[in-house]
Image: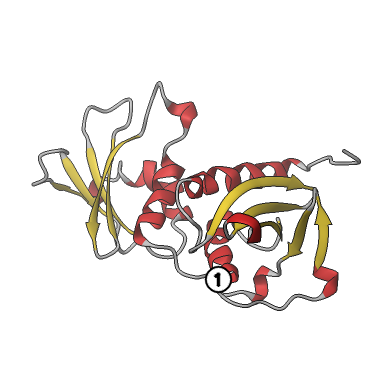
Amino acid sequence: MDERLIASEDREQQAAISRLLLYYLNAPLTEGCRLSGVLPTPGAVRIAVHAGDGEDSATFLYEIPHDAVAPYYIPGILRTVLAGTQIYSSSDISEAMGMTVIRLRPEEITPEEESEQGRALTALRALSDPGDEEDPFLIGFLLLGSGLLRLYVQRPDHPDVIGADIRLNGSPTALLASLPALVEEEQYRTPSDDPHCDFLVDLTDW
């Protein structure tokens, strides 16, 4: 590799995108299009998408600059691009490893909305750090419908199980980062009628 040094902030973004897209190995991005890989390149990520079947199939590399969009929006951008006819300038087309590279401009693309299950998966993955196996925080979840998700959480230094209700809209990054502190706030807690937790915390308007 010639000068493939990846800056630390790019490495973090690359890792986040790789984790986020693992789910799509098990299901098509859109009809006839499946994820084949997530490749690092300086300043950007290249997402390999295999389109079609048999002799007419091909794999494309969609390149997205790291500073253009948060990882959360990438699946929606890919669905938008793959679902419709797109026109690219010659400067946005190149080749690598025998595949056509298409450089995307996310600022010009309106991401297709993620499904409720996809948004739930994003939230759950953000709270399920493999490094926390000895002191887990998230210990369960329940999709309640209408874009609501109940998270069952427990701090290692407290015996109570807390049910935290959140709304699956937009990017929940700020809420999820604040969740460990919010569930400790007494003013948010109410006694629970859910037999799986001791208290409920309503964060649907947070």
Residue 55: x %, y % from top left: 65, 57
Query: Which of the colour schemes (rainbow, by chain, secondary structure, one colour) is used?
Result: secondary structure
Q: Is residue 158 above or below residue 32?
A: above
Residue in the image at 71% along x and 78% along y? 87
Choose between 66 and 111: the one closer to the eye.
111
| Furthest residue toward right | 2
In-front residue for pair 152/61: 61
Query: Which of the 4 quarters of the picture holds residue 56?
Result: bottom right
- For this view, does 12 lie left or right of residue 201? right
Q: How many marks?
A: 1
Quarter of the picture holding the C terminus: bottom left
Q: Is residue 155 above or below residue 200?
A: above
Instruction: Determine whether the residue tagged by mark 1 lies in a helix, strand or loop.
Output: helix
Residue 194 image position (x, y, % from top left)? 11, 45
Tell me if I can see residue 11 in this picture. yes
Crowdedness near tag 1: few (<14), some (14–19) or many (≥20) residues, C-alpha within 10 Å: some
Q: Which residue is mark 1?
A: 80
Task: Give residue 139's quadrant in the image.
Answer: top left
Amino acid type, residue under disc 1 in the picture: Thr
Could you tell me residue 129's position as x and y percent? 47, 34
Q: Picture coordinates of residue 75 (x, y %)?
A: 53, 59
Position of the N terminus by quadrant: top right
Outermost residue, front side: 55
Residue 195 placement, left or right of 53: left
**Identity of the residue drawn at 71% across and 70% down:** 105
Horizontal arrangement in the rendering, residue 171 relative to residue 186 (left or right)? right
Which residue is rendered at x = 63% and y = 58% of the image? 57
Question: At x 38% / y 41%, what residue is drawn?
Answer: 180
Asked if 167 appears above or below 163 in the picture, the reply is below
Q: Is residue 168 visible?
A: no
